Image (cartoon, grey):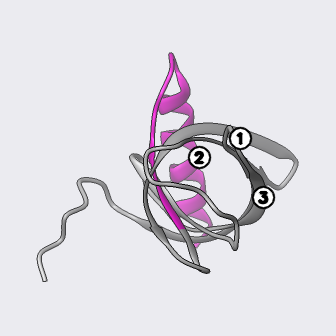
């Protein structure tokens, strides 16, 4: 199977609180890259919805925005990040920090 992702993935277990215009929930980010992530959650979102996520990282909260790309019922959803200003650089530093921990 051909890899479709444009960025390297990092397997993680980061607690996340997320919300869309219609719903909100909690879960964990199990797969994180510079372009998106997969959120394990039982919450109900629709493809195309804008999602605000707050990732709990030790003593910090990282807020990221993205668009739900696809949903796996009763499992979670994939998000493609939508960046503003220097958010992309902050995420890249976060990924470097997380990669260094392994």
For residue 90, above or below residue 85: below
In the rendered picture of this protein, how many numbered marks are placed on residues? 3
Q: CA distance from mark 3 to mark 2?
A: 23 Å
For residue 17, above or below residue 65: below
**Sequence order check, earlier mark of 1 and 3:** 3
Q: Which mark is residue 62?
A: 1
Q: CA distance from mark 1 to mark 3?
A: 16 Å
Residue shown at the point (66%, 43%) measured from the top left:
20
Q: Is 52 situated left or right of 23 in this image?
A: left
User: Which quadrant of the rendered structure holds the N terminus?
Assistant: bottom left
Q: Nearer the viewer, mark 3 or mark 2?
A: 3
Residue shown at the point (79%, 53%) measured from the top left:
56
Position in image of residue 27 (x %, y %): 73, 67
Tag 1–tag 2 contact (CB < 8 Å): yes
Residue shown at the point (78%, 58%) measured from the top left:
25
- Location of mark 3 (residue): 25
Residues rendered magenta in the picture? 77-102
User: The residue tagged with tag 3: helix, strand or loop?
Assistant: strand
Position in image of residue 23 (x %, y %): 74, 50
Residue 91 picture quarter: top right
Residue shown at the point (54%, 28%) measured from the top left:
87
User: The residue tagged with tag 2: helix, strand or loop?
Assistant: helix
Single out the residue that lies furthest toward the left. Answer: 2
- Location of mark 2 (residue): 94
User: The residue tagged with tag 1: helix, strand or loop?
Assistant: strand
**Sequence order check, earlier mark of 1 and 2:** 1
Mark 3, Cα crowd under 10 Å, few <14 / some 14-19 / many 20+, is: some
Instruction: Give yes or no for residue 94 being in the magenta stretch.
Output: yes
For residue 12, above or below residue 92: below
């Amino acid at each position: 199977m051909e890899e479709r992702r444009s960025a390297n993935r990092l397997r993680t277990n980061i607690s996340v609180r997320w919300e869309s215009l219609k719903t909100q929930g909690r879960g964990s980010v199990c797969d994180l890259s510079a372009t998106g992530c997969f959120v394990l959650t039982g919450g109900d979102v629709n493809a195309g919805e804008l999602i605000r996520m707050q990732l709990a990282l030790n003593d910090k909260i990282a807020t990221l925005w993205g668009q739900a790309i696809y949903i796996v019922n009763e499992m979670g959803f994939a998000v493609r990040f939508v960046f503003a200003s220097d958010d992309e650089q902050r995420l890249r530093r976060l990924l470097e920090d997380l990669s260094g921990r392994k």
